[in-house]
Image (cartoon, rainbow, N blue to C red):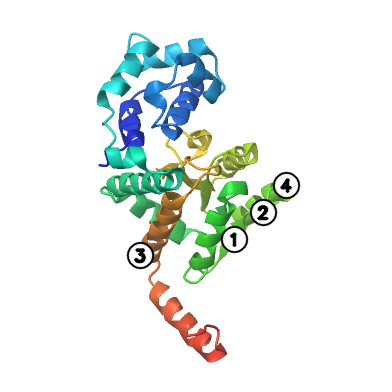
Amino acid sequence: MSDSPAARLQVLFEGHRLTPTQRRIAHCMVRRAADAPFLSSVELAELAGVSQPSVTRFAVALGFDGYPALRRHLRDVAPAESSAKALANEYQQAVEAEIENLRHLAGLLADPAPVERAGRLLAASRPLPVLGLRAAASQAYGFSYFAAKVHPDVRLLDEGGTMLADRVDAAVRAGATALLCFALPRHPREVVDTLANARAAGLTVVTVADSAFAPVAAHSDLLLPAAVGTGLAFDTACAPMLLGRVLLEAMCDGLPDAQARLEEFDVRAAERGLFVE
């Protein structure tokens, strides 16, 4: 398991029954893992959009006497940064942070059972709706593009609006049993509402999110976390993209004709001169 700041926070939060407000604070701390040991309770409350007393109650829920005790604990377990990292410019720091996110993902994948279960669920769903709005739209599109080469019916849901619920309902009527969602910050309320409606309609929701404490967690049957980088003006999402490809591999394992479909595509692509070799 990676020893990244985000990984250590995930371990700290595991096993605790947190309220929605406390999950929001936990999610904020995971996103700001490198800064968390140095944030005051007021600063953390402002970042998470909660009250300062909520931060204190959150620390107590984790077993600490108060927030100062939690912050001291985080400082005690934080590794000292190497001089090389301290001298790195902001672009290098962003790359280093993404490398840490990938290491954390590799640690999570040491137990392949959740991804293997997700692959079976996605392979069995006919059709397979894939949801991703705003920042997550490109992740949903990338997954759907490759999934369509091996899955007989993939339906991309990358546009919000009043038609979104209709398209989910249509997928259910057509026989869908599962929905795959990519959920990245900032999390659109529409995604949360859509997942709630999808589960109410009987779909099993598999979600790739930036944190196990993301707002979509409460409406997901199986959540697979992959952290995003927050060091640049806009978040970077190397780990969620890679996790999407891992899910594709797991789904292919659940599709006995996947290899035949790929070979058929290659033959047709060659006949049409589709690619420049």
Amino acid beneath label 2: Arg
Q: Can residue 228 be seen by looking at this rendering?
A: no
Which is nearer the N-term, disc 1 or disc 2?
1
Mark 4 near mark 2, Cβ–Cβ under 8 Å?
no
Which numbered circle lies on residue 261?
none
Find numbered disc 3 in the image and state the secondary structure of the residue it sits on: helix
Choose the circle earlier in sequence order: 4 or 1: 1
Q: Nearer the viewer, mark 3 or mark 4?
A: 4
Chain-order first, disc 3 or disc 4: 4
Comparing 147 with 10, the one in front is 10
- Secondary structure, mark 2, is helix
The amino acid type, in three-letter code, at marker 4 is Gly
**x, y percent for residue 54:** 49, 14
Q: Amino acid at mark 3?
A: Asp
**Label 1 vs 3, first from the N-terminus:** 1
Residue indicated by mark 3: 253
**What residue did someone put label 4 on?**
161
Residue of label 2: 167
